[in-house]
């Protein structure tokens, strides 16, 4: 998401007005722009970077995702929570105009209504990642109400792109499957074939994020986080969609610990609040996304393994 969002910000504000940061790199597309090595847990470096550059907006994406978080719970909590609070604090201190921070469908849990999950409903996450997202939403709302910080958030579904490998989540199968379909014509899925999950193509995630941040403040009624949606599908359906383009593609199933995580998440999302408040509308369904990825990923793979 980081590199794709950076490209979106380059288009919106000009490359010269955007600085991307990460604890390593820059890699791939980010090599073309301003970049700083930054560990968001290092508060002094974070503050001096904000003070020196007088940032007007910050997009804080650093997080340990669901699957990796279950293996490193303390690290996940420390990075996901202290990283966020460091950014919120420094943004108040240096009068940053707007802050963006992503929540996730992982903030929902086993007793959350699974079909068309409402904007405001039961949230009983079962993963450390999900617990950190639920807590983070409350912190964002607290900083808005008590510190007047214009912080905004979206509950991302599983995000699918082709410009970078997935990063330790449960929806990662829907990214991996494209890489394997093109390189090995087969894929072993770690979820059951009929596991429905809300998903979104990366271009729609960038569009939703920038539309939210560009909307007038008085339109932003949800100061915890907005549900956003584009499509829901299961491994059997995306495999069938890929097979329409790559007839020899074979999928097999070997569910692991991530199945329990997926089973605790919604099947589909009600995002009417985002549509009403700031005009959210996705552009990509499963078919459009599959055509786009299968058209562009080969070129990307050539760049990765020339
Ligand atoms: C994950 O699978 O952990 C993430 C998410 C849904 O937030 N992709």
Image (cartoon, helix red, strand yellow):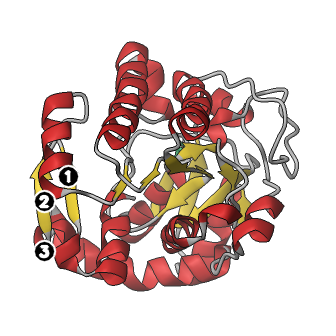
Q: Where is residue 76, by image quadrant? A: top left
Q: Secondary structure at mark 1?
A: strand
| Front residue (pair 292, 43) | 43
Residue in the image at 73% along x and 33% along y: 263
Give the residue at x 64% y 81%.
283
* Depth check, front residue: 261 or 11: 11
Picture quarter with the N terminus: bottom left
**Residue 18 location (% of width, % of height):** 23, 68
Q: Position of residue 186 (x, y in %)?
A: 47, 60
- What is the CA distance from the residue labelled 1 to the residue labelled 2? 6 Å
Which one is earlier in the sequence, the residue at label 1 or at label 3? Answer: 1
Residue found 36% across the figure and 24% down from its top: 82
Residue 159, percent across and down? 53, 58
Q: Is 226 on the left-hand or right-hand side of 269?
A: left
Judge whether residue 25 can be spotted in this image: no
Q: Is residue 238 above or below residue 25?
A: below
Q: Which residue is mark 1?
A: 21
**Contact, mark 1 vs mark 2 (Cβ under 8 Å):** yes
> Dividing the picture into quarters, in which one does residue 98 lie?
bottom left
Which residue is labeled 2 in the image?
Answer: 35
Is ligand 1 within 8 Å of the beta carbon of the residue shown at mark 2? no
Sort mark 1 into few (<14), some (14-19) or many (20+) by Cα contacts within 10 Å: many
Percent coordinates x, y for residue 106 in the rendering: 63, 37
Q: Quadrant of ligand 1?
A: top right
Specify few, some or many for label 2: CA neighbours under 10 Å numbering under 14, 14-19, or 20 or more.
some
Looking at the rendered structure, the secondary structure element under dot 2 is strand
Mark 3 vs mark 2: give the one in front: 2
On screen, residue 288 versus residue 21, left or right, reads right
State the mark number for residue 32: 3
The picture quadrant where one finds residue 276 is bottom right
Q: CA distance from mark 3 to mark 2?
A: 9 Å
């Amino acid at each position: 998401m980081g590199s794709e969002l950076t490209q979106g910000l380059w288009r919106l504000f000009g490359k010269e007005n955007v600085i991307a940061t990460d604890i390593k790199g820059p890699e791939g597309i980010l090599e073309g722009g301003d970049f700083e090595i930054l560990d968001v847990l290092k508060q002094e470096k974070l503050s001096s970077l904000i003070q020196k550059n007088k940032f007007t907006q910050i997009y804080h994406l650093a997080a340990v995702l669901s699957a990796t978080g279950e293996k490193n719970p303390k690290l996940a909590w420390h990075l996901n929570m202290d990283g966020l609070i460091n950014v919120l604090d420094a943004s108040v201190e240096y009068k940053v105009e707007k802050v963006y921070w992503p929540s996730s469908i992982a903030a929902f849990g086993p007793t959350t209504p699974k079909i068309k999950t409402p904007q405001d409903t039961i949230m009983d996450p079962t993963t450390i990642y999900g617990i950190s997202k639920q807590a983070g939403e409350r912190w964002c709302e607290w900083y808005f109400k008590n510190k007047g910080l214009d912080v905004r958030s979206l509950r991302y579904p599983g995000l699918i792109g082709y410009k970078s490998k997935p990063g330790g989540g449960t929806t990662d199968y829907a990214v991996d499957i494209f890489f394997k379909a093109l390189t090995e014509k087969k894929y072993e899925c770690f979820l059951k074939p009929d596991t429905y999950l809300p998903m979104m193509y990366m271009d729609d995630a960038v569009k939703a994020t920038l539309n939210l941040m560009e909307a007038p403040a008085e339109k932003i009624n949800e100061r915890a986080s907005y549900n956003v949606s584009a499509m829901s599908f299961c491994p059997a359906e995306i495999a069938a969609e890929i097979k329409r383009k790559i007839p020899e593609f074979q999928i097999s199933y070997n569910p692991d610990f991530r199945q329990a995580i997926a089973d605790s998440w919604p099947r589909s999302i009600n995002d009417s609040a985002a549509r009403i408040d700031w005009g959210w509308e996705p552009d990509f369904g499963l078919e459009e996304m599959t055509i786009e990825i299968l058209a562009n990923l080969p070129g990307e793979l050539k760049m990765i393994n020339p």
